[in-house]
Image (cartoon, grey):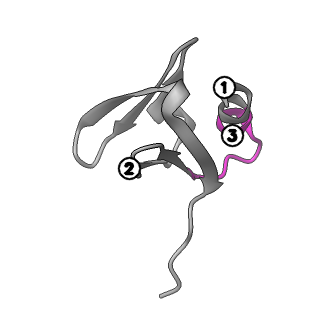
Amino acid sequence: MQEQLENAITAQPFVPFRVGMSNGAEYTVKHPENCILTKHFFVVYDPANEELDELYLLHVASISPEQRSEA
C-alpha cells in the first residue's frame, strides 16, 4: 500500500484522493503538501479543520480518486 500512496502523492498532474481505513474511516488528500508518507505511517493534514491524522499503513484498506460532486 505504501507504493500506491507514493504514486498517488507524486502523480503529475496531482489528483485528489481518498484513503479508506479498515475501520471504515475515510480521509481526503486534496493537495500533496497536506500529507507525509513514512515507513509505517501516512500522515494527513486537513487545513479546513486544522486536524492532523496519523494513519497506520497496515490499516489502509483502499486508495481511490476523490469523487467530484456535480453541481
Q: Amino acid at mark 2?
A: Ala
| Count of marks placed on residues | 3
Asked if labels 1 and 2 touch by Cβ distance under 8 angstroms, the answer is no
Q: Amino acid at mark 3?
A: Ala
Q: Which residue is mark 2?
A: 25
Pinpoint residue 24: horizontal percent, then vertical percent.
Answer: 41, 52
Asked which secondary structure carries label 3, the reply is helix
Is residue 30 placed above or below 32 in the rendered structure?
below
Quadrant containing the N terminus in the rendered view: top right
Q: Residues within 10 Å of mark 2 (few under 14, many from 20)?
A: few
Q: Which residue is mark 1?
A: 2
Q: Amino acid at mark 1?
A: Gln
Is residue 30 on the magenta stretch? Answer: no
Q: Residues within 10 Å of mark 1 (few under 14, many from 20)?
A: some
Rounded to the nearest angstrom, the CA distance separating label 2 from label 1 is 18 Å
Q: Is residue 58 left or right of residue 26?
A: right
Q: Nearer the viewer, residue 22 or 40?
A: 22
Q: Is residue 18 left or right of residue 49?
A: right
Q: Earlier in the sequence, mark 2 or mark 1?
A: 1
Q: Residue at x 52, y 46 (%)?
A: 19
Q: Which residue is mark 3?
A: 8
Q: Earlier in the sequence, mark 3 or mark 1?
A: 1
Asked if labels 2 and 3 touch by Cβ distance under 8 angstroms, the answer is no
Looking at the rendering, the stretch of residues picked out in magenta corresponds to 7-17
Is residue 35 placed above or below 19 in the rendered structure?
above
Disc on res. 65:
none
Pinpoint residue 33: horizontal percent, then vertical percent.
Answer: 50, 31
